[in-house]
Image (tube, grey):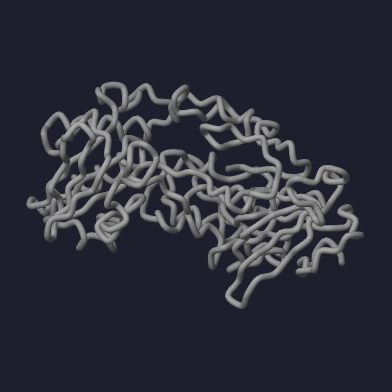
Amino acid sequence: MDANTVATPRSPGLGREPAGLPVVVIGAGPIGLAAAAHLAAKGERFIVLEAGAGAGTHIASWGHVQVFSPWQFNVDPIARGMLRNAGWAEPNPDALPTGAEIVSGYLEPLAKLPELEPHLRFGARVIAIARVAHDKMKTPGRDGAAFDVRIRTATGEEAFLARAVIDASGTSGAPNPLGANGLPAIGEDLSRDRVFYGIPDVLGVDRGRYAGRSVLVVGSGHSAFNALLDLAWLASSEPATSITWAIRREDAGNMYGGGAADALPARGSLGARLRDLVESGRIRIETGFRAHAVERTGSKITLLSPDGRSAGPVDEIIAVTGFRPDLTMLRELRLDLDSIVESPRALAPLIDPNVHSAGRCPRMVPRSCASPSPAFTSSA
């Protein structure tokens, strides 16, 4: 099989040498396709396994959101070169794209390049990865064994052999629950029809869900900022819309960011605009609120804290509480992960929110994603 042929599923064999096998990339988002572009540029054999129906599936789920990093920071240099050679009309490097524009203007054209397209397989969810003939407890010969990558498709399960694996599956498919202790709030599962996890399209397809209704937003990151700003805009034309914002912090002061001093002006603008809305009373804020339980009474739901405080009753809750990696598929690998952030240990102090904000995180280096399991790398 040459470098331009998609790997086909094989039944793992004891004698198979890893050297002739392809690299498996998990995920066809920005990181996965960038990895694929680099592999293609080096003439390496690879296959990209994507659970969704197309490139950038997770990004498409928040396609209505405009990011605060301009195009120049969203395009991989190797991928850019390949696209230019194919006649790609490069967007204005200083413009701020939406998620949908990143998908349609970058990821989809990249996925269709002849260097990449034959190597992509959509609708293929990776469910487990192991070393051929080596369970997690077996050490002799482990580092030299090929990877056994199991996928689930619409027609059943298959297995691929790989000499290396790049996990670019991301975290967007695994949102954190409402509970402040990391567990679902008591009663949360019974009220999921009234809770949206992530950033709803408040001004678009989800308008009917929120217009003229009482809404509680839980979370203090920039995703929460986007949801709150959209709700405030909705309320300007639908005055019956009421907005409450619950955060765990006791003081919202420095949460709004650096304003005009922010290195990314659009990010600073989000915080400044939100501060104005809170101070004007258009958004009511509950500080020091730690969600513990969800109480449902008729058509209304109320979020309760352990100290007896309540937020609500409201019609809808938007949970913008972040995401965590789903490590289920990696159970049979030997990984040295940080016990708190659940990332490679060297990467953890660079992204720990207790140490850094999004505006102060230092530049990351490739070795930060290294794994003690040779030939396995994770960007999660």
| Residue 186 in picture, x, y percent from top left | 29, 48
Q: Which residue lies furthest to the left in this view?
A: 240
> How many numbered dots are placed on residues in this image?
0
User: Quick check: 374 left or right of 93?
Assistant: right
Residue depicted at 62% across the width and 60% down the height = 126
Residue 164 in view of the camera: yes
Residue depicted at 46% across the width and 39% down the height = 69
Quadrant of the snapshot with the C terminus: top right
Image quadrant in which you'd find residue 366? top right
Image quadrant in which you'd find residue 263? top left
| Residue 214 in picture, x, y percent from top left | 14, 51
Q: Nearer the viewer, residue 280 or 261?
A: 280
Q: Residue furthest bottom?
A: 155
| Residue 336 in picture, x, y percent from top left | 66, 35
Quadrant of the snapshot with the N terminus: bottom right
Residue depicted at 22% across the width and 29% down the height = 287
Against 156, residue 315 (above or below) is: above
Q: Which residue lies furthest to the front in this view?
A: 137
User: Quick check: 171 left or right of 4?
Assistant: left
Q: Which of 175 and 105 is in front in this view?
A: 175
Against 315, residue 350 (above or below) is: above
Residue 236 in view of the camera: no
Image quadrant in which you'd find residue 363? top right
Q: Which of 149 and 35 is in front in this view?
A: 149
